[in-house]
Structure formats: C-alpha cells, structure tokens
Amino acid sequence: MTYTDQLALLDAIENFSVPIIPPTTHFWMIRTKKGYFYNEFLSKRFVALAWNNISQETDFSESNKDSLKDDILMTFKEIHRPSTVINKCHSFIYEIKTNDILVIPSAKSSYITFALAGEYYEDDSKTLELEQNVIYRIDNHDVDINDVSCPYKKRRHMTLLRTVKNEELNYSLCRAISNYHGISNLDSYSKQILNALYNYYMFGNDMSFVLNVRKQTPIGPRSINNVLYGTTELLTSIASEECISTQVSLNSPGDIVFSLVNVKNLLVDNWQFIFAILVFLGGGSALSFKVPGAIDIVKSIFSAKDDYRIKHAEAEKAELEVLEKKADLLQKIKDSGINPESLKNPVDALLTGCTTLEVEPIILDDASAANVPLATEVQESPDIEDE
C-alpha cells in the first residue's frame, strides 16, 4: 500500500460523518398499478397518482367535499369510498415534501425501490379520458406491462436511492408493502426503511448501525457472538450501555441492527473516529474507495504511538506524515477517555465474525437503483387503489 493510499484512508476516518435524517422526514409508499408503471417511474424518475379529475386546482375545502365526492362517484364507478380518494390526492399534492422517502414496489413486489421525493408537477397532456382508457385496458388484460405509459396527471420528480429484492427486507416492512393502497404513509416503519437504506445513520436523537449479513449457509453461534461482543464493546466506549439495544433478524440473509437511543448529546468527544472504525471494519460503506491492506492500517492506529517513536528518526517524509496522522488519531481517541488497548480484542472479534457472516455494505447509487430486470409479469391479485 502506498503512503498516498494510507493517507487517503486515514483522512477518510478523520473526516467521517454520519448521515443525519431530518426528524421531519416522512415515508410514503407509491404503488405502480400492478407493476405496469414501475419501469417507467424508474427510467423517467417520477411517481404519479391516479384520479385525473383531481388536481392542484381542486378545491379541497370542507364546503366543497360533498360536491367532490359526487364527482368521484360519477367519474369512477369502481370507487366506493370517495373520501379516501380525496385524502390520498391531498396527501400526494400537499403532504409529501421534497426529500421525503418513497417506497416503490414492482410487479408482485418482487423488487422495492427507495427514492427521495422531489417537487410536485402536473402533466396536462394526461387527460381523464386517457386515464380511463388505459386503466380499462390494464384491468381487462388488454395490454402488456411494457406497452403502456402512465396516464396519470399528478406527478412528482424523484431521485433514486436503492433497489432491493423483496426477500432482503424486514418481514414487517414486507407485510406493510403488501397492501394495495395507491399511496400509503409508512412513518411507523421509518426505522425498517432506513435500515434498508443505510449502514449507519442518525434519526432524531437515535443513531443506528446496521450489519448486512449475506451468508446463505447455516450460521454458527460463535460468529454471532463475535459480532455482538465486538460491536458492543466498541459502542460502549462511546456511549452508555443503557442506551444500546440490538435487534437480530437472520433469515440468511438478514441483518443485525444496533440502536443507540437518545444519544445525540451524550456521545463522548471524538466519538466519530471509533464509529468510523466500527463501520469500516463491520462492512459498512464508510469509504467510497478500496485500499489494499486497509484493515491492517486501521488496526495499526491503536499502536501508532509506539510506531511513531520507533520509526520517527529514520522515516521518510511521506511515511512520517502517515505516522503523524495515526498518532494524532490515537491521541484524540485517548483524549475521549477511551483506552485503545481495550479495543484490540473487540476489533479482532468483529473482523472474524463479519468475515464469517459475509457482511456486506449498502451502496447507494442512482445507477444501481435503476438497474433491475424489466418487469414482464403483472400482479394478478386485486390492485384496488381507491381504498
């Protein structure tokens, strides 16, 4: 490994930051009409909602509610609860905010795409007559899934984050996604959604660290024990153990989630260096690049002072810069009241456990988020988007 590579790695640890999800973020599922519009939503970076007779110009006031309900019942004969349609349209137009997180299922919910909501807009070329014609053909199996464009007027731009297979998701989130509402609020599943999106994040006053286990064969108890022991010891060096909880969901693959509750103002000074090391060694995407021998470099931080004293006199300029950077990180860790020697065994245990469990990082990439097989099958179960 070159000294340039080593410095880049050490700088990444020193400048490490945790994604902060604003507490005002809301979470929404937008369905795709049996998957018919899923490919178009991803390729053209928008989501849309039905009922073209309702738009931004619609009067949603209480005094107009009865008239609006009558209009919906007369226009869409299949609708039985018009107030639900009104509420969903109002949510799509006014309640979804820029940077809210969208959950978008494909046909049969085989793939789930996560995205950031963008600005609302309307496509005036999408008329009510066009919508009724296209939806009639879909409901009567008169058109293939990739041979029809979304006829909905109400739209939102979006930025893709990640696409996953259904089986990679938390079980309770899968259950929530299985409902057939055209739009649903998923705020009660915020943690499960964020765990699917990030290896580590701060949401409100809580911080989470997620290990994505990808081992397909049976998992031995020692591997789990190594991960639990190593991670817990590292986390308790920066926060009180009373704040830490663990949730294990191992369905081969599965995840192990460590939550630090109400710790935003309780973390020790320079905690981010320990957390960066934890994330990096635990398979997280703390770094946007790969450095050969990086694990050895990270571990060597804990003995940096000794290396510095031994090699300082004869070190070349580039090597000296690396030694000084390691020594500086080590001193900051010590200044936080953390004994580096106490972390060596947990680090080794964590490395062993993560290697055995085939822990992999989550990569957020706009290109990979859209890189899923084109849907060719429709969902045959009812897709009632008015309830």
Image (tube, rainbow, N blue to C red):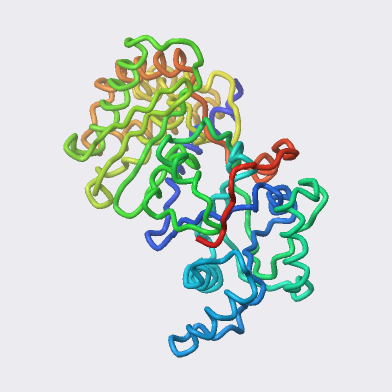
Q: Could you say which is closer to the camera, residue 155 or residue 380?
A: 380
Quarter of the rendering containing residue 76: bottom right
Q: Is residue 149 left or right of residue 105?
A: right
Q: Is residue 265 left or right of residue 293?
A: left
Residue 224 in picture, x, y percent from top left: 34, 17
Q: Is residue 150 above or below residue 166?
A: below
Q: Could you say which is closer to the camera, residue 387 or residue 159?
A: 387
Q: Residue at x 38, y 30 (%)?
A: 278
| Quarter of the figure with the N terminus | top right
Residue found farthest to the bottom? 63
Q: Is residue 234 above or below residue 109?
A: above
Q: How many marks?
A: 0
Residue 55 in picture, x, y percent from top left: 62, 77
Residue found farthest to the right? 147
Q: Could you say which is closer to the camera, residue 232 or residue 95?
A: 95
Query: Looking at the image, can residue 97 be seen?
Result: no
Query: Looking at the image, can residue 208 be seen?
Result: yes
Q: Residue at x 76, y 60 (%)?
A: 134
Quarter of the rendering containing residue 249: top left
Residue 138 in picture, x, y percent from top left: 73, 53
Residue 296 in picture, x, y percent from top left: 47, 18
Q: Is residue 334 left or right of residue 305?
A: left
Q: Residue at x 67, y 72 (%)?
A: 52
Q: Could you say which is closer to the camera, residue 157 or residue 202?
A: 157
